[in-house]
Amino acid sequence: MKILITGGSGFLGRAILKRFQEQDIIRLGRSERCEIKCDIARETPLISMQPDYLIHAAGKAHMIPKTQEEADAFFRVNTVGTERLLQALKGKSLKGIIFISTVAVYGLETGYMIDEDEPLSGQSPYALSKIQAEKLLEEYAHQNSVPLLILRLPLLTGPDAPGNFGAMVRAIQKGYYFRIGDGSARRSMVRAADVADALPLLLGRSGTYNLTDGHHPSVGELDQVIARKLHRNIRALPMKWARLLARIGDRIPGSPFHTARLDKLSNELIFTDAKARTDWGWSPHRVIDNLDI
């Protein structure tokens, strides 16, 4: 069995690689350690061997674009990169594809128990580029009769995590973190290790699934667990002061804290993974009980 993996040097990709036998893995990416060295945002890879499965975890995320060039980068990597990858796989007889997508495709800032039937209304460059990548993969899978499994992930946690979780850990570690209000807003998240552990059992499956830890901890629960592990204290910023600072930030170009950011931090955003639990027994660890930082 040969598994072609893109994004193996990324946060989730590194966890995925640990779950497979080294002799089964063919890495495709920009690193010199990859068996197929290629930047799919710039060129079409040459795939001379026959992989049995594709795990497509490469992608651009964790950045709010400030320029059109930065926005375009999402499409070059996530959309055009996927198109080039599929071009390189023409004529190959794949037994299955797993695509790592995101709940950002729904385009929601708040909601409760959002399932896979929610319309794909995301408008950010990240969301749009992932929606387009999903569609390209669906077309390829249909035309070539290949099972396609799309996994839409929320906040990923784990050691040296990027994105909002990593930013929270670093802020608590360095002492400049403030909980906004009472920290009661709940958010969906999942351990990268649990997603990676599931993949060997999912090769050849099809469908679209949200994956979460099923607990959806509050911001307050999460920051307290991180603080205890780091032997730090949590300070809180009352909501009235947070709103004042956000309004000030609205008037300062490039400010990292503004009303839109405050709303995102204080709104509840919960996705359901009931479909994965029913269809193939998805049963991950609760993040706050098994937190690795």
Image (spheres, rainbow, N blue to C red):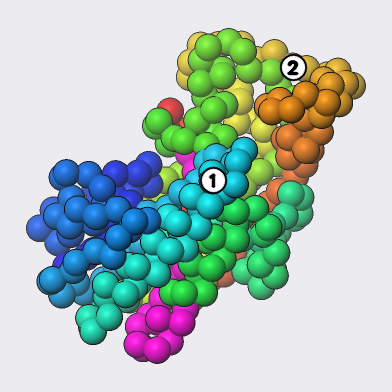
Tell me the mark number nearer the camera, choosing from 2 and 1. 1
Q: Is residue 186 left or right of residue 245?
A: left
Magenta residue check for 139: yes
How many marks are shown on the rendered structure? 2
**Residue 264 placement, left or right of 150:** right
Measuring 26% from the left and 72% from the top, which residue is drawn there?
Answer: 88
Tell me: residue 244, above or below residue 140. above
Q: Which mark is residue 236?
A: 2
Segment colored magenta: 138-157
Q: Quadrant of the C terminus?
A: top left
Query: Which structural element holds mark 1?
Result: helix
Q: Which residue is mark 1?
A: 69
Residue 9 included in the magenta stretch of the image: no
The structure residue drawn at horizontal position 57% and vertical position 35%, both measured from the top left corner, is 164
Above/below status of 218 relative to 220: below
Q: Viewed as shown, does residue 26 lie left or right of 70?
A: left
Residue at 81% x, 33% y is 259
